[in-house]
C-alpha cells in the first residue's frame, strides 16, 4: 500500500513538473496562435463583420488589398482603407481637416482592433514578448507583452499592452495597456459575455483604471484582485455578426 501511494505521489509530481516545464517552454507567438485558434478570430481575414458600439455602427470587410474599416452615424460614414481616411455624407465625399483625419482614423482602427483580438496580435507592426506566468482565482495565465514598431504602428506606437491568456484553453481573459496621450495612464479590462457567432468570438469588457498612476503594468491583475482598481466604463459590442466572403485575389 505504501509503495502504491509513493508511486502515485511521484507520478503526480512528475506530471506536474512536466506541465510546468511545458508551460515555460511555450513562446509568446505560440501562445497567441493558440489563442487565435480558440477564438476563431482568424476568420476576419475573409469575412464581413458588423457591430454597434456606443450608438455607432461599425463594419469591417476583408478585401484583396487589406481590411476596409468603417463607422457610421446617421448619414455620415467614415472609411479607413489602405491607410487613407475618407468621409461621406449622404454618399457624397467631403473634405476633413488633416489633423482630424488622424484622430478619426485612430478612433476607427482602435475600436475594430479590440473586437478583432487576439488575431490583430499577428499584425506586422506587433512585437511580442513573453513575461512570467501569473495566477488569479486558482487559474494560471500566460502573460504576453505587446509593443509596436514605429513603422505601421500608428500614432500610439509607443503604447504597451499586456494580455493574460488562460493556460487551460488559451482564452483571453484580461488585458491592460499603458497610454501616453492626454497625460497618459493605464487601463485594465476584464473579459465578460463571451459569445461565439459562426465560430468567431466576440467579447465585452469591464474597463478599469488604477487609483494611482504609481503602478507597473504587470501588477494590474494583482491590483484588480485586491480591489485597487476603479471601474471606468463598460466596453460592449452589440448586435455582432460575421459572414464569410469569397475573395478572388
Image (cartoon, rainbow, N blue to C red):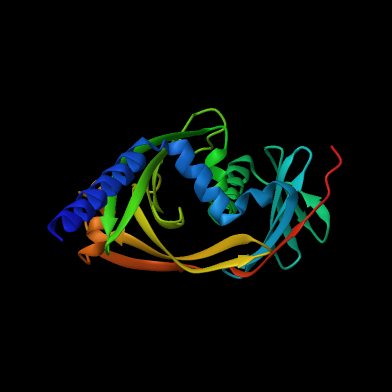
Q: Quadrant of the N terminus?
A: bottom left
180 displayed left or right of 152? left
Report which quarter residue 20 is drawn in: top left
Q: Nearer the viewer, residue 80 or 129?
A: 129
Can residue 221 be seen here? yes
Residue at image point 61% right, 52% down: 41
Q: Nearer the viewer, residue 177 or 143?
A: 143
Residue 175: horizontal and vertical position, in percent?
Answer: 40, 53
Q: Residue 140 versus residue 175: which sits nearer the camera? A: 140
Outermost residue, left side:
2
Side of 31 relative to 41 (left or right): left
Residue under the point 55% across and 39% down: 122
Q: Position of residue 191 (x, y in %)?
A: 44, 63
Observer able to see residue 179:
no
Across and down, in percent, residue 95 comes to: 73, 46
Quarter of the image where the C terminus is located = top right
Amino acid at each position: 500500500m505504501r509503495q502504491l501511494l509513493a508511486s502515485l505521489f511521484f507520478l503526480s509530481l512528475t506530471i506536474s513538473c512536466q506541465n510546468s516545464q511545458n508551460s515555460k517552454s511555450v513562446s509568446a507567438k505560440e501562445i497567441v496562435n493558440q489563442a487565435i485558434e480558440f477564438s476563431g478570430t482568424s476568420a476576419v481575414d475573409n469575412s464581413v463583420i458588423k457591430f454597434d458600439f456606443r450608438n455607432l455602427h461599425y463594419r469591417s470587410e476583408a478585401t484583396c488589398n487589406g481590411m476596409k474599416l468603417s463607422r457610421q452615424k446617421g448619414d455620415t460614414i467614415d472609411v479607413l482603407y489602405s491607410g487613407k481616411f475618407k468621409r461621406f455624407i449622404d454618399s457624397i465625399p467631403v473634405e476633413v481637416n488633416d489633423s482630424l483625419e488622424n484622430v478619426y482614423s485612430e478612433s476607427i482602427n482602435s475600436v475594430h482592433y479590440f473586437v478583432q483580438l487576439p488575431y490583430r496580435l499577428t499584425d506586422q507592426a506587433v512585437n511580442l514578448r513573453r513575461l512570467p506566468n501569473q495566477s488569479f482565482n486558482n487559474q494560471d495565465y500566460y502573460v504576453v507583452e505587446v509593443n509596436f514598431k514605429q513603422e505601421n504602428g500608428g500614432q500610439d506606437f509607443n503604447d504597451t499592452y499586456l494580455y493574460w491568456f488562460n493556460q487551460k484553453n488559451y482564452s483571453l481573459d484580461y488585458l491592460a495597456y499603458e497610454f501616453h496621450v492626454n497625460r497618459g495612464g493605464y487601463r485594465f479590462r476584464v473579459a465578460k459575455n463571451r459569445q461565439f457567432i459562426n465560430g468567431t468570438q466576440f467579447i465585452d469588457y469591464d474597463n478599469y483604471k488604477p487609483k494611482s498612476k504609481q503602478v507597473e503594468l504587470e501588477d494590474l491583475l494583482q491590483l484588480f484582485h485586491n480591489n485597487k482598481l476603479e471601474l471606468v466604463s463598460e466596453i460592449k459590442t452589440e448586435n455582432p455578426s460575421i459572414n464569410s466572403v469569397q475573395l478572388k485575389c
